Amino acid sequence: MKSYSESRILPKGLTSEEFYRLMKVVSAKDVTARISFVLAYGSGLRISEVLKLSPENVTDGQIMVWQGKGKVDRAVPIPKGWKKWMINELPLKRGERTIERKFKAYSRKAGLPQHYVFHSLRHGFGLRAIEKGIPANQVQLLMGHSSLSVTNIYTKARPKDALDKYEELF
């Protein structure tokens, strides 16, 4: 399978506004969806990493991801939308397909583009991190990418900075 950098497919990630619209339509009673969406978008976790989390992973203002993809351990930030009650719901007792279906259903309800999948939340994290000026090598660490070339795809996904610089200079 080709990587993003080999195939030149740009990641499609939710913007902050789209994430807000999504969370507005999520039922307050659907704690699985709330927690999984917040962790993927706010911490850049993969769906498998979300499902492996337990209360012991959340410590000292960070979340420890043990044995993520490629057996990589890493620390990620606790997302801004994290609430104290959420820790008591870990580990989530649902499967990947259930969470993916929930994401698709809530995305439709929020009027988000149809091409979004659960992983688009993680892409949103990477895109926002680059847009906010976090150096690519630090985004690589947060996302658990094996190489910087994988992370660098996020610098190309939304060429806003390059277009803004062009407008400023020309």
Image (tube, grey):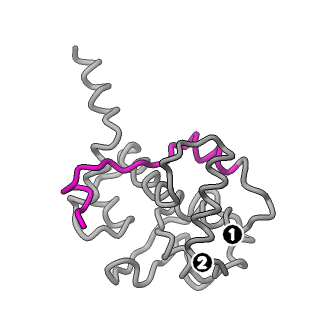
Q: On the image, numbered disc 1 is attached to which residue?
A: 32
Q: Looking at the picture, how far across and down is residue 16, in whole percent?
A: 55, 43
Which amino acid lies under the numbered mark 2 shown in the image of this protein? Gly
Q: Residue at x 63, y 40 (%)?
A: 111
Task: Please say if 132 is above or below 102.
Answer: above
Out of 72 and 79, give the one closest to the viewer.
72
Q: Earlier in the sequence, mark 2 or mark 1?
A: 1
Which amino acid lies under the numbered mark 1 shown in the image of this protein? Thr
What element does badge 1 sit on? helix
- Which segment is the magenta one? 1-23
Q: On the image, numbered disc 2 is attached to which residue?
A: 95
Q: Residue at x 35, y 39 (%)?
A: 158
Q: Residues within 10 Å of mark 1 (few under 14, many from 20)?
A: some
Magenta segment includes 6: yes
The image quadrant that residue 138 belongs to is: bottom left
Out of 20 and 75, give the one closest to the viewer.
20
